[in-house]
């Protein structure tokens, strides 16, 4: 039994902050941000919009695209690093909005790799027969934990949501997933937003050693490409589409180079929405499915790297 993607959806909040806008907030330039990151603009949640609000839009978008009844969902996994509340989980808050009752619903926290982790778990539920139709979401409101006076991070991170619906099917779907973590790198990419740091409210920030994260991301993603291909006995040329985590165009280019993949076969959306952490892979996937680039039967390599460090990949026959 395979997990097949039967629907995708995504949502970006209306408010757009361009690189030019950022020039009046911190000491930066459109040219610096574009050259170092590939980002041109990002979307920010409205003051009254939460991570669950963004996710709900993406999920309704997915249900509509395939005319699927929410009542048929028997598993909800929600990847986020910016949950609405400490508890209940954002998955339970979303379940309530969808008027679904009884099926397991839980959050996964693996920062930018969260969606790949969620996909890995959902796939195992489906393969073992424990679920038949799973809703997997990646959604974030990272703007809430950004220090808007820190130019080294505020130009990178933003808000958004993406979702997929997986269904048990005998036809090929997810071929393999690979997830990893190494907590010894936890201080290279972190936030001071915490329960023990409640006094920090209003002073939260993301801390990042950008150069070190960059090098580790490039090397680690190169290695996971090899691991994924070897596990499936496939060649680089068997991949039709690379759907990478949208953190930085230079990291994406390095992975494409490793795969010897022309850039036309790489889904790149980072210019439109910056780094949306767990939302970034499903956002890119939904974009390329809806605009007709990704077609049924093609082979997709999804990958991500993030705080923790965590990293992972999924090889999918779409
Ligand atoms: N605008 C203008 N200058 C900036 C700037 C900004 N927004 N942010 C940093 N700078 C400056 C630095 O202060 C530094 O100035 P200095 O040389 O006078 O000290 C200079 O630019 C170079 O900084 P550095 O950090 O070495 O730049 P970089 O080439 O490594 O690029 C990143 C910075 C953040 C773009 C890059 O390290 C990166 O992409 N890292 C990975 C980040 C990431 O993707 N994280 C998430 C992973 S999931």
Image: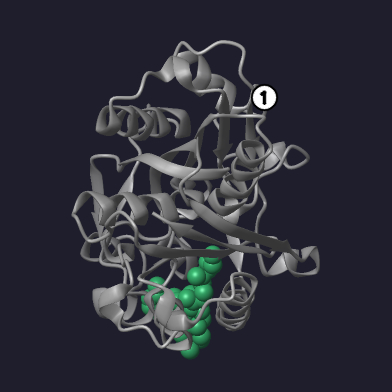
Instruction: Bin the neighbour count of mark 1 within 10 Å (Cα to Cα): few under 14, some 14-19, many 20 and up.
Output: few
Relative to residue 306, is residue 99 depicted above or below? Answer: above
* Location of mark 1 (residue): 87
Relative to residue 22, is residue 100 depicted above or below? Answer: above
Residue 268 shown left or right of residue 168 in the figure: left
The quadrant in which residue 64 appears is: top left
- Indicate the quadrant containing the C terminus: top left, top right, bottom left or bottom right: bottom left
Relative to residue 185, is residue 220 depicted above or below? Answer: below
Q: Position of residue 84 (x, y in %)?
A: 54, 30
Q: Position of residue 119 (x, y in %)?
A: 56, 47
Q: Is residue 86 visible?
A: yes
The quadrant in which residue 191 appears is: bottom right
Residue 21 shown left or right of residue 89 in the figure: left
Q: Position of residue 159 (x, y in %)?
A: 40, 47
Counting labels gives: 1
The quadrant in which residue 248 appears is: bottom left
Q: Residue at x 50, y 42 (%)?
A: 170
In the rendered view, how is the structure colored? one colour
Relative to residue 180, is residue 50 depicted above or below? Answer: above
Q: Nearer the viewer, residue 242 or 3?
A: 3
Residue 297 shown left or right of residue 170 in the figure: left
Q: Nearer the viewer, residue 114 or 66?
A: 66
Q: Residue furthest front?
A: 170
Q: Residue at x 38, y 45 (%)?
A: 160
């Amino acid at each position: 039994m395979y997990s097949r993607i039967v629907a995708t959806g995504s949502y970006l909040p209306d408010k757009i902050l361009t690189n030019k806008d950022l020039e009046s907030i911190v000491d930066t330039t459109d040219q610096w941000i574009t050259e170092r990151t590939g980002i041109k603009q990002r979307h920010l949640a409205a003051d009254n919009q939460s991570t669950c609000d963004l996710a709900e839009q993406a999920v309704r978008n997915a249900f509509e695209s395939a005319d699927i009844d929410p009542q048929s969902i028997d598993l909800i996994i929600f990847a986020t690093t910016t949950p609405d509340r400490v508890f209940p989980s954002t998955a339970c808050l979303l379940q309530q909005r969808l008027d679904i009752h009884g099926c397991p619903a839980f959050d996964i926290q693996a920062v930018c790799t969260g969606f790949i982790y969620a996909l890995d778990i959902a796939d195992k539920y489906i393969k073992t027969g424990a679920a038949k139709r799973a809703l997997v979401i990646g959604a974030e409101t990272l703007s809430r934990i950004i220090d808007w006076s820190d130019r080294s991070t505020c130009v990178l991170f933003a808000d958004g949501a993406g979702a997929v619906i997986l269904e048990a099917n005998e036809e090929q779907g997810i071929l393999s997933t690979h997830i990893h973590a190494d907590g010894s790198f936890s201080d290279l990419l972190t936030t001071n937003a915490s329960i023990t740091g409640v006094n920090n409210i209003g002073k939260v920030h993301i801390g990042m050693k950008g150069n070190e994260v960059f090098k580790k991301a490039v090397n680690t993603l190169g290695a996971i490409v090899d691991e994924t291909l070897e596990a499936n006995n496939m060649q680089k040329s068997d991949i039709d589409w690379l759907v990478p985590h949208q953190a930085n165009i230079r990291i994406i280019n390095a992975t494409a180079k490793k795969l010897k993949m022309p850039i036309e076969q790489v889904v790149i959306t980072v210019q439109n929405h910056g780094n949306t952490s767990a939302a970034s892979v499903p956002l890119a996937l939904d974009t390329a499915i809806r605009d007709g680039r990704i077609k049924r039967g093609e082979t997709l390599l999804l990958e991500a790297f993030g705080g923790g460090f965590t990293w992972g990949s999924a090889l999918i026959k779409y």
